[in-house]
Image (cartoon, helix red, strand yellow):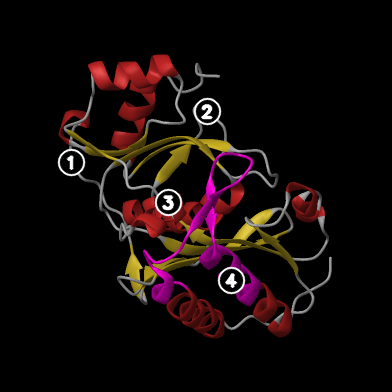
Amino acid sequence: MKRMKTLDPEQLKNIIVAAAREELLPRFARVSRRQKIDGSIVTEADLALQRRIARQLKQHWPDTVFLGEEMTAEEQAGLLESAQPVWCLDPLDGTSNFAAGIPYFAVSLALVQQGEVTLGLVYDPLRDECFTAGKGRGAAVNGQPLVLAETGLGLEETTAIIDFKRLSVPLAERLVSKPPFASQRNFGASALDWCWLAAGRGHLYLHGKQNIWDYAAGNLVFDEAGGYATTLSGGRVFINALQPRSVVAAVDENLFAAWTAWLGVGLEP
């Protein structure tokens, strides 16, 4: 495996922050949208930001590979198998929110080396919050450490962040008819969901289908903050592949045990 040029985290942060401020904020709620083949939407902001970041990453770290959400499936195929470090970018996580003027979206960037995420960065330009994590080095927001602690809450006292759209109908109906939590939210930007959980802004998480660019950076931030996560089948969330993953997560060990037991993790397909 080729070794990449020394990475300065502050330099990387400056690249992402400047790009987001200059490419996203002027277009917020002022862009047209079109539907992609998979039913999701894309705007000129997604495309402009991806082009700019891809160019700058290659300029500063030429011995790396780039994988972006707005590439075609043919372009994405095989990139994760590269012997070189791979940048995995979602230029605009929460495109639907962005186009509709809903202030909840972010840029998400992960660095994958030897099949593992070693660095994650998620930037929310509206709140000027930059969530960062390094594998084995902890997580932070704007330089302040993120460390999750035991909440002391029962499952029935929690706030859950749940994306119902991608769940099986029986599970969604069960959650609606017999919710085990006190309150539920769905914000619409996966990478930022992970980071808000890492900051203690919610207690439980459930999502039926996230792509690698949706979860790679945020999952690392959450893990490094001390959170607990798995899939509905009981597997590890991150795999070095384009295959989408489900997510079951909680901010402390006791809630994680209660949440996974209620969901029957390992029994769901």
- Residue drawn 50% across the image and 18% down it: 268
Which marked residue is nearer to the observer: mark 1 or mark 2? Answer: 2
Is residue 50 located in the magenta-colored stretch of the structure? yes
| Badge 1 vs badge 3, beta-carbon distance below 8 Å | no
Say what secondary structure mark 2 lies in: loop
| Relative side of 10 to 203, left or right | right
Instruction: Read off the residue under disc 2.
Output: 234
Disc 4 packing (10 Å; few <14; some 14–19; many ≥20): some
Quarter residue 182 falls in = top left
- Work out how far the residue at label 4 is from the one at label 3, CA to CA, in angstroms: 16 Å
The range drawn in magenta is 24-53
Q: Is residue 106 left or right of residue 237?
A: left
Residue type at mark 1?
A: Gly
Amino acid under label 4? Answer: Ala
- Near-viewer residue (185 or 75): 75
The answer to whether residue 141 is visible is yes
Whichever of callouts 2 and 3 sits on the residue coming sooner in the sequence is 3
Label 3 amino acid? Answer: Ser
Tag nearer the camera, 4 or 1: 4
Counting residues from the N terminus, which is met first, the one under dot 4 or under dot 3?
Answer: 4
Q: Which residue is mark 3?
A: 96
Which quarter shows the C terminus? top right
Residue type beneath disc 2: Gly
Disc 1 target residue = 152
Q: Give the CA separation, mark 4 to mark 2.
A: 38 Å
Residue ID for mark 4: 48
Number of the front mark, 1 or 3: 3
| Rendered image quadrant of residue 86 | bottom right
Mark 1 lies on a secondary structure that is loop
Point out residue 29 in the picture as x, y percentages from the top left corner: 36, 64
Closer to the N terminus: mark 1 or mark 2?
1
